[in-house]
Image (cartoon, grey):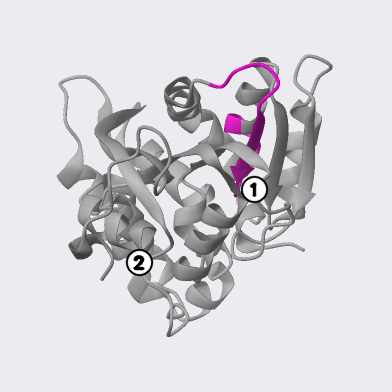
Amino acid sequence: MTTTWSLGEYPIMAQRLEPVAHAAVDVADIAPGENALDVATGTGNAALLAATRSANVIGVDSDEGLLRVALDRTTSRTPVRWQLGDAAALPVDDDWADVVLSTFGVMYATDHDAAARELARCTRATGRIVLASWTPDSFLPAFGRVVAPYLPPPPAASSPPSRWGDERALQDLLHSVGLVVVETRTMTLDMTFDDVAGAADFLIRTAGHVLAERSRLARTGRWHELRSDVERLVRTERHGTSGVHLDCDYLLTTAKVAGAPGAPEMSATMIR
């Protein structure tokens, strides 16, 4: 399967996101011999880091191109079993994972409810789930809103990916499948560029879903409009006195199966 994720240069975006994978794996506190599942692994950032902790790791993604990149990054020190599969139908046994990770991955599932159910299904009763998701007011969701008028509409049943970065919305989603949020932290990834044009170029060439529409937009004279709108966003959101700094805020969430040791009790308001 090939998706729009591999149409652009997403691997260079993934390089920028590696600090978040480090943060997620550190919070997960993976022990040697544990089973770790990285959902929507992309180029394998979190999965490969989990493997350095001597875990048994499966990395799942729906894009063959990204999995090939992940495979090329695998070494004898970082053995990972790479699997092609969708976040809403993971090719993993029930209760397999001691740790489930997803860094800017599961949030892009088309069916959020099904993806949440899969996270719960694959996690052992004593396991934990660590998710990193862009907050709704973060820069990357703002970029998505700017380019949205130029792109085909999303599937009618889909929800905005940043739902996973909204603390209350994520609590409701996870509680509906028997998971309880234990801890959340709002953190910031600072993306830096030399100038506005360089930032806009990076954002566009790493966004496969945008590049997929380039020919159509060019024929209608709208490609340059899109580029101008992205540059305008960068100018509005930039900060710092040297170069361009863009604040990319994300929610780092730890969840457990309801009733597990250390998990808060589910109240009636949580199960609505």
Pinpoint residue 108: horizontal percent, then vertical percent: 48, 59
Position of residue 101 relative to residue 92, above or below, is above
Q: Residue at x 31, y 38 (%)?
A: 182
Assign the N terminus to one quadrant of the image.
bottom right
Earlier sequence position, callout 1 versus callout 2:
1
Type of residue at label 1?
Asp
Q: Residue at x 35, y 66 (%)?
A: 160
Task: Examine the structure image and report whether residue 186 is included in the region drawn in magenta.
Answer: no
Residue with the mark numbered 1: 95
Which element is circle 1 on? loop
State the residue lying farthest toward the right.
76
Pinpoint residue 170: horizontal percent, then vertical percent: 31, 55
Horizontal side, residue 135 vs residue 125: left or right: left
Disc sitting over residue 160 in the figure: 2
Along the line of sight, which residue is nearer the eye, 156 or 131?
131
Along the line of sight, which residue is nearer the eye, 114 or 94?
94
